[in-house]
Image: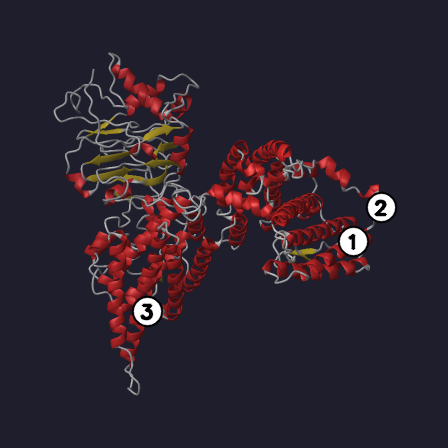
Amino acid sequence: MFPHETPRRCIGNINPLSGSSSTLLLSELGCSLVLATTKVYANLHGFLQPSRHLSKKFPEGSAEGPGSGAPRSVSFREPPTTQGAHRVWKKKITSGLAIVSNLARREGGRRRPNRGGGEGGGVAGEREVPGVRERGRGRAPLAYACVHAVGRAGLRGEGAAAAEAASLFPWSGQCVAARVTTGEVGIMVMKASVDDDDSGWELSMPEKMEKSNTNWVDITQDFEEACRELKLGELLHDKLFGLFEAMSAIEMMDPKMDAGMIGNQVNRKVLNFEQAIKDGTIKIKDLTLPELIGIMDTCFCCLITWLEGHSLAQTVFTCLYIHNPDFIEDPAMKAFALGILKICDIAREKVNKAAVFEEEDFQSMTYGFKMANSVTDLRVTGMLKDVEDDMQRRVKSTRSRQGEERDPEVELEHQQCLAVFSRVKFTRVLLTVLIAFTKKETSAVAEAQKLMVQAADLLSAIHNSLHHGIQAQNDTTKGDHPIMMGFEPLVNQRLLPPTFPRYAKIIKREEMVSYFARLIDRIKTVCEVVNLTNLHCILDFFCEFSEQSPCVLSRSLLQTTFLVDNKKVFGTHLMQDMVKDALRSFVSPPVLSPKCYLYNNHQAKDCIDSFVTHCVRPFCSLIQIHGHNRARQRDKLGHILEEFATLQDEAEKVDAALHTMLLKQEPQRQHLACLGTWVLYHNLRIMIQYLLSGFELELYSMHEYYYIYWYLSEFLYAWLMSTLSRADGSQMAEERIMEEQQKGRSSKKTKKKKKVRPLSREITMSQAYQNMCAGMFKTMVAFDMDGKVRKPKFELDSEQVRYEHRFAPFNSVMTPPPVHYLQFKEMSDLNKYSPPPQSPELYVAASKHFQQAKMILENIPNPDHEVNRILKVAKPNFVVMKLLAGGHKKESKVPPEFDFSAHKYFPVVKLV
């Protein structure tokens, strides 16, 4: 039995892939040890998983210390508890190192003597390491070993020694030993060349280490004996070292794979906030006006870059002032830093609460930084207002008087004071707007709308004064990181996960102003949603807002404004009531009419209430889907069709039950397909949006256009117009019954006023869309006949496979039934006509569709942007189809161009 002690910090788990000879060293004075061999990958997860280590500590005076004559033992996770401890520790070493015995025997005879004079063996390093000097260059086969020794400072690098311990070495020869003591880390490496005995790396101890009483013990022979116990071809594998650990060992500390290694590749010293203050490289008081302007502008740029999907550590927190505003003595800088922190905190809270972001949209991790939670929002806005008032007084005091000769220096100071004033006020206004959106009252939204007007007025002053701020200098040592006082791009590099390096390119200051202008416009638009009362109008609003591809913050504000924390719409209306109002406005079901018998029937009321309650979840999900980015929306629309298919089944059952009840009391009324029509309408809208979004996202190849447009024109839009017509007819029938009841009660004749049908505009737009899709379908078929559509040579798939993949989400929907590929081929087969139409006839038919769409759209009163966009496509396509029908470029086999710039769903056809 041998006494063992647990080391202060584990070193790593090393898994050799081959068994070459190695010199393995143990420290006597409480040192942890990393062992490595030729072609070895060392797992660097050891500092996170203390149980995974291979180390030895000899307490002073121990009977097992050097010279005691006792067998040298190594602690591997747990001390041995059996009489065969000497054999156990050897096997545990070989298990942890996973050595193949035949390679061990083959290379065992090539072992080199230890050059370290008994003080250590080593491997080669790629870069300069303290305590290592080069004696020459040998040509040895190299492999990678990751060596990581963590001392009291930890991996974060609170001492230079810990940072230097994290290194990646191409090496060959013997081994590496890393020593960790309280307060210092020494890396001893030596490169031994197989070919040249006189060249290589020699061990050189750091100054502190040379003065210590450390004694090292050579365990090479014991290690080789342990290797010999393995049979030929036998491989020992520790259960704690699997594929994940092996890949981590390969990736960690590789500059191409590990983001944390970027900091090791710069020649300058990277300082944190406290170190920069001590070093005098950063000012915490008496900042000049140009310095304030430059720092504020760069902070704004970092804030926007964060909102565009980068991490806080690489954007906002590259500003050292943000790390700890309590250290800042300058009142303007301190208030601004706190304001930025509060803006980030509230924005992060809003985005997380709305839950309409993906990993590519937003990163909410704060990396342990304090978000000024100890200071209230009111206090921060008060501090900003104090600075704002102080700057305003300076602006007034430096303002030129009429007829007075102007001093250039005073004029410059006036402009700079105005610039700082504009930025501080903009920060305060933006923070106040975000605070207003956290309130549940609708009046707060109106307040935010007014504040956005003030913010918009400040942008011109900010833009005109960009040149007054200090400018960032490019870091010549590494890439184009902007370097200026108060900013250190690499200060948080060690906080990033060991993934592929992702460089956060901070936007330019000119772009910052235009981004804020667009953000203000979007927030103004968000404020308008509270004026809507109809669920259909709200859905349309969300769709139109999403088409602008807004930022994640404005999308989240819209979501949280619509459905507040209390799960009420705008904080006041129940979602069930919104659904009932939508049903009344769309299809006027008798069960929701106060004049109907079913309105007061308890059984009917339970049926409709249950149905409406079941509608809440799918419709809230649908609205939330429109808050995601456009690419994610398509995927989520395909999944929500399943929920609407279930809802449609329930709607048909409720319709049947209510119809049976209604016939007994009011035979003249019907309740057939009222609720089902409404759900079917939304089903069709989702399906249409799913297909059309493929054009916007450029998912379809040219040879796929024809069946996408066919499905839309011949199937979905046909069903949609039928559904809208049925809903309109249901409304008219209910209105006639109401008028008859009104006539029976009143003897006076009322003049009939021509009412505008609520669904007439949507029916008209659907007709235009159907004609546009039909025109594009026939255009693509004609191009195919003329050999102008390039089709791929299908090897691993076919047109049927692609077709079924494109329409796969529709298989969960029963109404309308999905059209399978064979049905599509049969329905679109031109040979069923006698004689089959040729390409000129198809061009003529396509031109008629485009002309029909143009005529429908031109007759719409008060056309909106969508109408004008479609007209920009219909008119030129009509002309092009006429030319093609006349034989223009008939012999040309060059494929046409499809320009989607005018409209994202319908291209302008251009002949090349």
Q: Which mark is residue 836?
A: 2
Residue under numbered circle 1: 845
Residue placed most toward the observer, 737 or 264: 737
- Label 3 sits on a secondary structure element that is helix
Q: Residue at x 36, y 70 (%)?
A: 465
- The three-letter code of the residue at mark 1 reads Ala
Which residue is situated farthest in the front direction here? Answer: 747
Residue under numbered circle 3: 419
Q: Is residue 652 above or below residue 458?
A: above
Mark 1 or 2, which is nearer the eye?
Answer: 1
Reading the chain from its start, which is encountered first: label 2 or label 3? 3
Left or right: where 586 falls relative to 557: right
Q: How many marks are shown on the rendered structure?
A: 3
Q: Quadrant of residue 475?
A: bottom left
Q: What is the spatial separation of the Cα atoms under label 1 and label 2, in whole angstroms?
A: 14 Å
Residue placed most toward the observer, 201 or 163: 163
Q: What is the spatial separation of the Cα atoms under label 3 and label 1, in whole angstroms?
A: 62 Å
Left or right: where 516 falls relative to 64: right
Which part of the image, by quadrant, shows the N terminus?
A: top left
- Label 1 sits on a secondary structure element that is helix
Residue 720, how many percent across, how many down? 66, 45
- The three-letter code of the residue at mark 3 reads Ala
* Mark 2 Cα-neighbour bin, 10 Å: few <14, some 14–19, many ≥20: few
- The three-letter code of the residue at mark 2 reads Pro
